[in-house]
Amino acid sequence: MTKYRILSPRLAAQLLIWLLVAASLVARADELNVAVAANFFGALQELAPRFEQATGNKLVLSSGSSGQFYTQIKQGAPFDVLLSADSERPRQLEAEGLAVSGSRITYAIGTLVLWSPQSQMVDSEGKVLFNGQYRMIGIADPVNAPYGAAAEQVLKGLGIWEKLNRDKQIAFGENITQAWQFASTGNADMAFVALSQVTDGKIISGSYWIPPQSLYTPIDQDAVVLARTTKRRTAEVFLTWLRQDPQAIAIIKAAGYSVKP
Amino acid sequence: MIGSAYSVADLVALWISLKLATVTMVLLLLACTPLAWWLATTRSRVRVIIEAVAALPLVLPPTVVGFYLLLFLGPHGWGGRFAQQLGLQSLSFSFGGLVLGSMLYSLPFVMQPLQNAFQAVGQRTLEAAATLGAPPWDRFFSVALPLARRGFISAAVLAFAHTLGEFGVVLMIGGNIPGRTQTAAIAIFNYAEAMNYGAAQRLSVTLLMGCFVLLVIVYAVNRRLRNAVVIA
């Protein structure tokens, strides 16, 4: 019996290849691979569809710690843009020629907050830190996480860093997410976290104290275009949009950050 | 780079790792021996369920195990509430908490070699001992235990080594407190994150060399034991 075939497998494969080639020629929009610090991931998820609407370009997001991204980028990770949680690593990438020089912007400034899920725990002036009625405070690792470094500065500024460490009352999370977890699961009584983690325009639950900015160095979160990108123009468009578009700035502010004037 | 001196923090972290691995190994061997013996000899249908549960830590990512432990030990979790009722401190951020987490996470590595070893002893040998008039406890201590000793060595080595290299669970429930819950594995990770590759390598090489020597000794002893005659 003869089989009638409209398409031989070979012809079908060739057609498919041509279709793919044609599709890639037609599509002008780019896809940017963005490495984003975990604390800004939520905000960027909200920003991505707006950016796509505005420019037709897609963002593919990878969330992680800035330190890991830095190491991965040094080893040739295929990202086009890095949104770091600090300014140190983007600066270093720029100096090492791994980022496009002059592309660095501060896309957000983080706010530190002492937060507890319990409504009566933290007072609005942070006096709770001195009352000795708590077992553990969670903070992010001061060496690697910018919010951890800021928390250390605040506790040192208040003169209780030494004592808390001596009494082993500080639990160190690898990053700010873990510090938040320590407090939200109740294992730590309170934690220094990013305002962006506990706000939805206003503080979602619990009690908090926002330390005065004079107690710690501003947490500048910088972004850079990475040198190995083949989509430099689109990447630069994205960073400009992030820095200047009023809608983008509104979303960033609602997420608990401030921006440079 | 590797030759440079250890900091005090490095030595403390190594000490905590060694202590954690040793305590975990001993407690796991004690806890698993009766259970593995039961699993190897029972005909109960519950057996497969227990076996499956004991193998579960192999499946879950360590950070997930750690996260659930954190919930469990928190004031709203069963463990935390139980501790409160007894008037005790919660185990989170303590050495005891690390031991609990490590025991959970290394459980399959002890249970399975022990169960296999007891099964390899065989019903016949034990029945032979019984016909010679050995009571059950004697059959266990004079026949099963000596015959299963290689299983014990495997289990001990695996528990020790696996706990030394454990990272995720310790990271989640330890709180990285120097002198209490900061293990060598966590210290290495911190060094690498901080781009202090020299210090990271120094600790890594120490851990690797130490474990390598230990494993060589254990396997050499094991080989001798294999050839030795059992005098029961």
Image: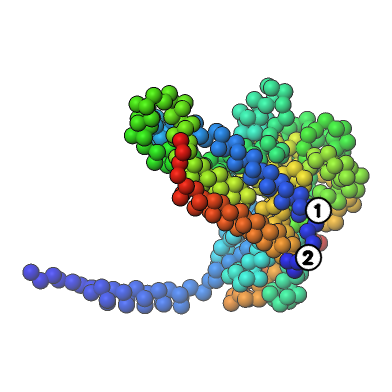
For the C terminus of chain A, the image quarter is bottom right
The image shows residue A163, relative to residue B131, as above or below, that is below
Mark 2: amino acid: Ser
Residue receiving disc 1: B8
Subunit of label 2: B
Residue receiving disc 2: B4
Which label sits on residue B19? none
Give me the residue at 49% from left, 42% from top. Answer: B149
* Position in image of residue B80 (x %, y %): 66, 29
Q: Dividing the picture into quarters, in which one does residue B73 lie?
A: top right
* Position in image of residue A66 (x %, y %): 69, 60
User: Which residue is more in the foreground, B140 or B9?
Assistant: B140
The image shows residue B113, relative to residue A237, as above or below, that is above
- Is residue A258 visible from the viewing direction of this image? no
* Position in image of residue B31 (x %, y %): 55, 33
The secondary structure type at the circle numbered 1 is: helix
Query: Are both tags, 2 and 1, on one chain?
Result: yes
- Is residue A15 visible from the viewing direction of this image? yes
Give me the residue at 41% from left, 35% from top. Answer: B40
The image shows residue A62, relative to residue A140, as above or below, that is below
Mark 1: amino acid: Val
Crowdedness near tag 1: few (<14), some (14–19) or many (≥20) residues, C-alpha within 10 Å? few
The secondary structure type at the circle numbered 2 is: loop
User: Which residue is more in the foreground, B27 or A137?
Assistant: B27
Q: Residue furthest left?
A: A1
